Structure formats: C-alpha cells, structure tokens
Image (tube, grey):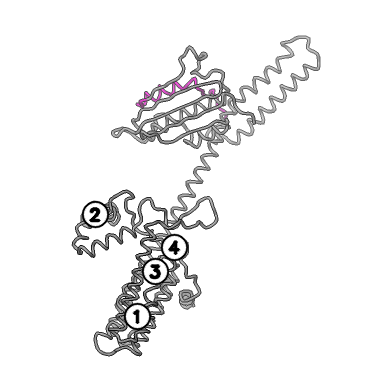
Amino acid sequence: VPLLEAVLDALWRWPARRPGGPLRLLGGPRRPARGRVVAGVCGALARGSQPVTLTLRVVFPLVGLPLGLVAYLLLWLVLPAEDDPPAEPEDADSEAPPAAPLPLPRELTAWALLLGVSAGLASLTAVQLAQFHQVPALAAVVLGFALGLPFALLPTAPLLTWRVMAAGLFATLLAVGAVGTVGAPPQNLWPWPVAALLALPVVLYAVAVSYPGWISAGVGILTVAFDVLAAYPLTGTHPAQTGWIAAVAAAVLLLGYNVRGRRTAQRRLAEESRLRRRDRARQAVLEERSRIARELHDVVSHHMSMIAIQADAAPYKFAGLEPGPTETFHAIRDAARDALAEMRRVVGLLREEDEGGPERAPQPGLALVPELVAQARQAGMDIALDAPPPEEAPPGGTGAPGLPDAVDLSAYRIVQESISNAGRHAPGAAVSVALRRTPSQVTVRVVNGPPAPAAAGGGRGAVDSGGHGLVGMRERVAMLGGRLRAGPTAEGGFEVVAELPPAAPPD
C-alpha cells in the first residue's frame, strides 16, 4: 500500500540526513552583498521593490524596538548574501556528487543561535508541563529535551528532528492524559506545549522542502493522526481545536511540497539550459572548423594547382630532359592532381547544401582590412585603423608582407569578427584596429569602448562576419599555434588580442 510504505519510510526506513547536504540556511531571497544591514534585509525581503522596502522599514519599528531589533538581526543572519555560495553547488564537469561548501561565519553564528533557541524550547516546554499540566518534574524535563533539543539538528537532518519531536509530542499527550490535570478548561484546550507547537510548522516545512513527496505524505499522516487528532481521545481536547491545528499542519506540508516542486523544476530548467549552451558551443566549434576547412581548401587548392601545372610544363620548358626527370615531373603532376581531387572530395562533404560548390572569389587577407574598416565607417561606426604605412607594405598589402595564406586569412577573419561583435554588443562605441608584425609574430588588436547610451539601432553588427564569435577566433588561433586574449577592459569595453606566428605550424 503506497500510504503504508510512505509511513514506514517516514518513521525509520528513509535516511534521516537531508539529501544534498546540510540546509545551510541559504534558502530564500538574497540581500545585497555590500549593503547596509537595514537596507540589505528590507531589500532582500522586498525582492527589489522600492515601495515594499519603504513599507518594511516602517513596519519593523512599529513591531516594537526590542522585538523588531531581534527580528532584524536574526533575518540578517539567516538571509543569504548575493555573494554567498549556493546551498547545493553543482559541478557541471564532474559526475561525482559535489562536496558541500564550508559553512560561513554568519552561518555558524546562526547555528549557535539555533542551538540557543532549541534550549529555550526545551526549557519552556518543561516548565509548562510541570507547572501548568502538573506532570512530574522528571518526566517534564525528559519531554522538554525530546521536544526542544532536536530543533538544533534541523539544518542537517530535518527528518530526524521530526521523528524525535513527533515521538515527544505523542508521549506528551500520553503523559498529560495519564498523570496531568485534565478535564477542566483550559487544560483540555491546549494539551500540547505552546513552544513545541509553534516550532512544529517550521520542522514540517523543512521536511517538505528537503525530502520527496511521499515522505511528506507519511509525515503528514503520522503528525495529524498521533500528534494532533490523538489529543481528543487522550486528553479530551475539543475536536474543533484539533481540526484547525491539523489543517494548519497539512497546509504547511503542502506549501513545502509546492516550494520543493518549484525548486526542482528550476534546477531542471537550469540544467537543460546548461546542456543547451554546451551543445550550441560544440555546434559552433564544428561549424567553425568546417568553415576553416572550406577556406583553407580554397587557399591550398590554388597552390596544388600551380604545382600540377608547373610539373606538367617542365618537360616542355626544358628541352632535352632525360626520361628519368621527365617521369619524376609527371609523378609530381599526378600526385598533385590526385591530392587536389581528394581534398575537393573531402571538403565537399563539409560544404552546406545551399553553398552549391567551391568558392569562386579569392579568399580575403589583411590587404582588405582598410576596405573592411571603410565599410564599417559607412555603417556608422566610429572606427580607427592603425597599420604600417603603405610604403612599408608590398603592393596591395597592409603591413604583413610575405605571410602564408592561412595566417593572412585568419588574421583578416579575426579583425572582421571583432568589428562585427563590437557593432553588435557595443553600439556607438569607439573601435580601434591595430596591426603589427615582428619577425616572431603577427599581432592583431581590436579594442572597443563602452556602448554609447543613446546609440540607435544597437544590438546589430555593422559588418557581417558569418562566424561564431570568440569560438571561431580561438579555433583559428589554435590551428595556427598562436595565442588569443579576449576580455573586458577597465574602461568598460572589450579587447581582442591575437598573436599569430609568421608561418603556419607543421602538422
């Protein structure tokens, strides 16, 4: 029977410790990390609403200076700060269960206060049982310990706290009904210790938000049957009194169950979002690698064609060659043609259906960066180019003479992608492009400032790139054996620095 199984699990079969580690007092709204105590607590409870924040600042003093001050301090200790670690950290790259973070000093202080509260509950319960219900002193002290001290275990083992408190409440009803003063109002109206009855909803809520739903159902059945409704046959409490207390207990459990369900749904949604982001990143890497392969095919196929042509023309160019060198040139020609055909076949598999066939136009290089900058200026961008003067560059070059085609193409693509990202994410910002070459490396640096507040048409790049942002840049730089640095600047902008070798690395 499912309900019987739930009751047995709640009583003793289910592990008492909370799944996922201690509660750590980190649930609920978060207060500003560096805010003042008053502003932080009110802002956290108001969840950013200014009218509610002002209302809370008025309500707390109206409660009373001593009580309001104590409540404020307790809330400041219990509510997590924005920079606190999560209660249940998740390690996306590890399949092992994550280790719970170390308790914060604020949490240790709150736990010490919780221990004091549990001692106060035990004392108040023992005094009420001994003075009000005339329970013998020794029995009153034992029942007080059973009802109060387990409250200190609530952050670590809510189910164990409930088990001990539920047994203590049932034993209290038995003691009040057997040896206490029963039968005359108001003793038969409140056979439960008031302090324990006030702490019970907190324990029920902690159980409901920490354990599966069937555990909450078993806890609810046992609590209502043996700790609330049993007061009528054992102590003569009016049924209406037990009825509304049972309704409150059931409502608290239902609230905790709903909160747990919402948190579970949020965690699942966050996990799905993380998986989607990872899949999109992998897809971007694959697409960028395919794009690089297609571009390199167009670059390398030109050189392979030239090798085949030169090898085929060599016997006619140098008359009187012996058969041996002629056969060697023919072998070079055939090998170049075979390699070119094989490369076209392989790269053809990478091409998308809508591309149709090989590229007809030559691949761009650093010589076209001035045109790229001019295009961005026509689109309304504030962009400056810092490159070697024309006299230091070869005809048609931009300060990077003698570069391999792969390095030249990758440097151009990095500039193109950086300008596009600046126009898309920082509309209206000033952009500077710098190209430098030394004997040891080629450096491309693109920096943009913070976005202009009144920029029109923000969020759209002025230059189309067709790439995948930083993913594509890293793939290109890694392919060439270079280094890439990309990140925000101190002024609020963004900087991309690519350092490429002057020659492509060997395979």
The quadrant of the image that shows the C terminus is: top right
Is 168 in front, or is 52? 168
Q: Check the image and name the residue furthest to the top.
A: 319
- Crowding at label 1, few (<14), some or many (≥20) Cα neighbours within 10 Å? many
Q: Is residue 308 left or right of residue 27?
A: right
Residue that mark 2 sits on: 53
- Secondary element under disc 3, as helix, strand or loop, is helix
Residue that mark 3 sits on: 152
Residue that mark 4 sits on: 22
425 versus 187 height, above or below:
above
236 versus 209 height, above or below:
below
**Disc with the residue nearer the chain's start (1 vs 3):** 3
Query: Could one spot residue 460 in this view of the protein?
Result: no
Distance from the alpha carbon under mark 4 to that under mark 2:
30 Å
The residue mark sitting in front, 4 or 3, is: 3
Kind of residue at badge 4: Pro
**Disc with the residue nearer the chain's start (2 vs 3):** 2
- Secondary element under disc 4, as helix, strand or loop, is loop
Query: Could one spot residue 420 in this view of the protein?
Result: yes
Residue that mark 1 sits on: 228
Q: Specify whether residue 287 is painted magenta.
A: no
Kind of residue at badge 3: Ala
Q: Specify whether residue 376 is painted magenta.
A: yes
The residue mark sitting in front, 4 or 2, is: 4
Kind of residue at badge 1: Val
When asked about the image quadrant of residue 113, the answer is: bottom left
- Crowding at label 4, few (<14), some or many (≥20) Cα neighbours within 10 Å? many
**Disc with the residue nearer the chain's start (4 vs 3):** 4
The magenta segment: 357-382
